[in-house]
Image (cartoon, rainbow, N blue to C red):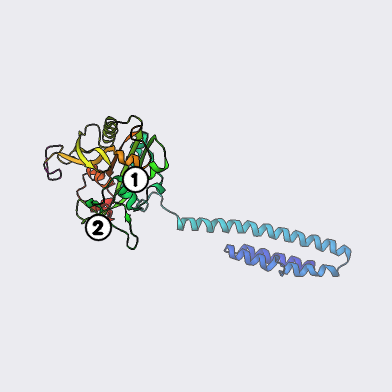
Amino acid sequence: MKTQLENIYNSAKSDIENAQSVNDIEEIRLKYLSRKGEFNSIKKGLKDLSDEDKKIIGSLANKITQDLEGLLKEKYDIFYQKELNEKLEHEKIDITLSGKYISEGRVHPLTETTNEIVSIFQSLGFSVVAPELSPEVETEYYNFDMLNVPKDHPARDVQDTFYVKDMPGVVLRSQTSGAQIHVMENQKPPIKVISPGRVYRNENINARKNNFFHQIEGLYVDKGITFGDLKGVLNEFTRLYFGSARPTRFRSSFFPFTEPSAEVDVQCIMCQGNGCRTCSGTGWLEVLGCGMVHANVLRGVGIDPDVYSGFAFGMGIERLAMLKYAIDDIRLFFNNDKRFLEQF
């Protein structure tokens, strides 16, 4: 049995010396040292030996096993490192090469404009109305009646307003002003809020008009609020949004829910006030409507107009974006043309 062990050992050493790869080393290990390998087959015969021979042969078998495991590991490490180096050399990446360009998404210009306007008014002490107080699907009661709009007003016609089919008295809101009523019904003065959102008008679509667009409504109600406060807030807004060098002016106007009412103009961005096609030769562009909250509106929500006063304003977000970025067609905001959107 001793001779058998020595012969197997010598055979294994020869195989290890002639091995050419990691796979060869694994096959040698399985051949000689696995459970079904040649050394284990010999060891099974130890039970038939005398106690003295068991000690001698068992010790020799263990020594040979340890020697072979050491030789196998040494050879395996050599082949493994060699094969790893070859693989790394073959698969190496040139980190000096330029990477692939992956285009990033951009904030839509209307979202960017809305965020900027909201940020300005928040810096002036206004808070944003909760969405549930500014619904897009509205009743005539909030969209017209509570805003002091007469029953025979042209704005109520189907030529101007979208009515919901099979739901009498329900409309797609034509203005964000209805949010004023919801807020004043749910909150006592002082009230100082803005409400951005989408509105709908039955308009023919062209470069200047769309049948849906975005507005921001503002409302400030407290004791002692005057038209001077209104002018101060809106002048500060236009200064922060357009820049301090952009002149503004207030013109008298009419809205059913404010009295007195006004429209605010800024100097034309295109011609710098010299007169052009964009401003119809006037040198001015309208940016928003505003006024002191009508006494009837305050009474309708249970606020005493003899104690409280307030002002309201509404502005089109698309119009403000068009003026600031010199965009001449409102439809560009909704066409999803990457060439347009990538400019922002």
Q: Residue at x 35, y 45 (%)?
A: 179
Residue 289 location, quadrant? top left
Earlier-in-chain disc, 2 versus 1: 2
Q: Residues in magenta?
A: 273-280
Q: In which quarter of the view is residue 263 placed?
A: top left
Asked if residue 279 lies in the magenta stretch, the reply is yes
Residue 314 located left or right of residue 54: left
Other residues around mark 2 within 10 Å, as few (<14) / some (14–19) / many (≥20): few
Is residue 122 toward the left or the right of residue 289 in the image? Answer: right
Residue beneath disc 1: 196
Where does residue 203 sit, x and y in percent of width and height?
22, 55
- Determine which residue is flagged by label 2: 158
Give SS at disc 1.
strand
Q: Taken as a whole, is the magenta stretch helix, strand or loop?
A: loop
Percent coordinates x, y for residue 210 in the rendering: 24, 54
Answer yes or no: do the residues labelled 2 and 1 have beta carbons within 8 Å?
no
Secondary structure under tag 2 reads loop
Residue nearer the viewer, 88 or 241:
241
